[in-house]
Amino acid sequence: MSAFNDIRDYVGIPRVLSLKLAPDGSRLVSVVQSLNPDGKSYGTALWGIPVFDPAPPPPADKDREPARLTRSTKGESSADFTDAGDVLFTSARPDPTVKDPDEEVPALWLLPRSGGEARQVATRPGGIGAFRTAGQVVVFAADVLTGEEAAEEERRKARKDAGISAILHEGYPVRYWDHDLGPGRTRLFAATIGDDRLEDVRDLTPAPGEALRDVSFALTPDGSTVIATWRVFLPRGELRSELVAIDVASGEGRVLFSDEAYDFTGPIAVSPDGARVACARERLTGLDLSARSELWIGDLATGEGATHAPDLFPMDIVWAPDSSAVFIVADHQGRRPIFRVPLPERRSSRRESEERANEERSGRDNWHADAVRLTSDDAAYLSLSASQDGRFVYALRSGVDAAPAPARVDAVSGEITALPSPAPALELPGTLTEISATADDGQEIRGWLVLPSGASADNPAPFLLWIHGGPVASWNDWSWRWNPWIMAEQGYAVLLPDPCLSTGYGQHMIDRGWGDWGPRTLADLDAIVDVALARDDIDADRLGAMGGSYGGYMANWVAGHSDRYKAIVTHASLWNLDQFAGTTDASMYWQREFGDPGSERYAKLSPHHALDKISTPMLVIHGDKDYRVPIGEGLRLWWDLQRTGVESKFLYFPDENHWVLKPGNAVAWYETVLAFLAQHVLAQEWKRPDSLA
């Protein structure tokens, strides 16, 4: 039976989360998430994945199969290799060498290449987060309380024993996605790999304030310099991000890249020759200035740099081993290919910047510029690693119709070889096809259409419009949380469109919808929905619509501006924009696009102004721990629907955030959505889900 038929089977499918290549190219390591024995939570473990060339005689079968490397109740994450081939990872598992540890927080562990048990090599009272390694050097991020470091553990314990959870903030922001900020501050520490533990641990950033919150960082190949994002706090709650270079030996730092009109952010990668740094440069938005991200490559010595591959939003970056090019992944036409960006020999960075600026001014026809698409399939790639011999790029390969799995890509031809995966291949209950439409302004709108098995002119499928979040995003990847194949298993045709504001179609596609969310997006959606409904294998009378986050905003907008759908599901949705923009975790970002509270765009674009036009039954879903779209949006929407008599239900998760992550709650989510759609789209009698009985 299909794993998509019973949601309980679906949530038990193992999930490959990451991929990293050993320095000698001999193996890969991956973090894999799977259901814990209690069935109530997920755990993670490290898996080794063999790398072999199919041209010579194949190795023994046992050498072809992935092997589990770690087991613990707390799980393991953030795996990476040392130059010696040992595996470093973080885990909150207890240290067997310490009797009765006071508290289990993430620590740094080392799994020897030669085999044997993993050992803890570093810990901090507030835990260890991200880390990077080069040569014998390890740099890691840790949460540290302000004050005397030697007494930090005692101060944390005293705070806990006193029952103090309060946090005194003196600046903005105070929350991020699903967690509170403070009272600790992120710092970077450097250390040397010793025989049993990290040695010579030293604080590189003793007084960063809030500058290293959610830091992205990389190490130069010789381990001498850390390249890190550094937040600059501005008046009126604004901030921007610079890139700084910190000397590992002295802790001295300098600003590497800074521009008042841009953020310099991760991903960050340093060239193998140590001369250049690649990162993402994001334009600071405004009322009439849309979101834009681009590949930035600069000189580590001088700080001068230039943009490359305009209009490709880089999501991952890795250098070719000879430093002659970078490989990036970026959304493109409903896919996320690997691109190769060849670089000229090092020259005057000022001249290079001028040439790039001229390219940008040349318009949309030049929007790929110097990027060469390496992969030509329909897949989405992530977690890039380049082999030291320059022959291959390793990555996780996925797609709307394929869960992430390891793959090897020829760095010249783009030929793709599937590698053994720790997770099983999935049989899908339908097929994936591509459709497009022309919007009222002449813009082509494309999308993916999931068709259930058996859909035909004699048996047309009910239709479900699924609107993506973001809004600067695209339907191009597998999603465990928003999986259309569960709906296809129940007989629905699911349209996954990329309207305005979607990435992968050039900057003009984002510009079209900037500051015009509802009206422009709905016109695009209507155009491609019309094309889908013209098919004889889709039932044009049985329609539903749904979306989450920005997709939830659009679901609310559709409810107030269209009566073509028989049911609407809105998850983590924006309802009252003025309220949302002042209570979200990043108000400064959204108010750049909408303006100060009470300005014209709130009145024009807030879905709640069309409450009196809503007659379609609605299912409202929200998690209490959602700080990006706070619970007040869901509560206000639910009350407005109730007080105006709109048929509606409210699925509330007290312990979930912007997403629904716990397996039991995921079961309840899908069962409730399917029951609601069955009632209103399929005209079946309402049946309360068994999971909520």
Image (cartoon, grey):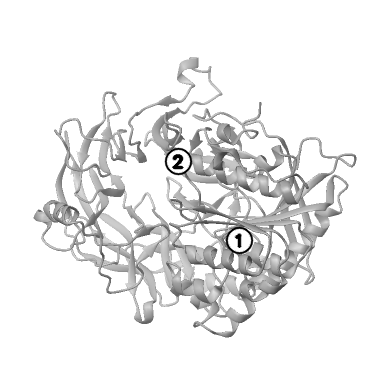
Residue 634 seen by the camera: yes
Q: Which of 292 and 95 lies nearest the eye of the viewer? A: 95
Residue name at image x 70 percent, y 37 percent = 489
- Residue that mark 1 sits on: 552
Residue name at image x 36 percent, y 40 percent = 77
Where disc 1 sits, the SS reads helix
Q: Quadrant of residue 122?
A: top left
Foreground tag (2 vs 1): 1
Residue 478 seen by the camera: no
In this picture, residue 209 sits left or right of residue 292: left
Residue 607 place in picture, x, y as percent: 63, 71
Q: Closer to the N terminus: mark 2 or mark 1?
A: 2
- Residue that mark 2 sits on: 18
Q: Quadrant of residue 276?
A: bottom left
**Whole-number angstrom distance, CA of label 2 to CA of label 1:** 29 Å
Residue 558 place in picture, x, y as percent: 70, 65
Residue 343 place in picture, x, y as percent: 49, 57
Residue name at image x 57 percent, y 66 percent = 639
Pick the quarter of the image with the N terminus: top right
Q: Are marks 2 and 1 in contact (CB under 8 Å)?
A: no
Q: Is residue 229 above or below residue 583?
A: above
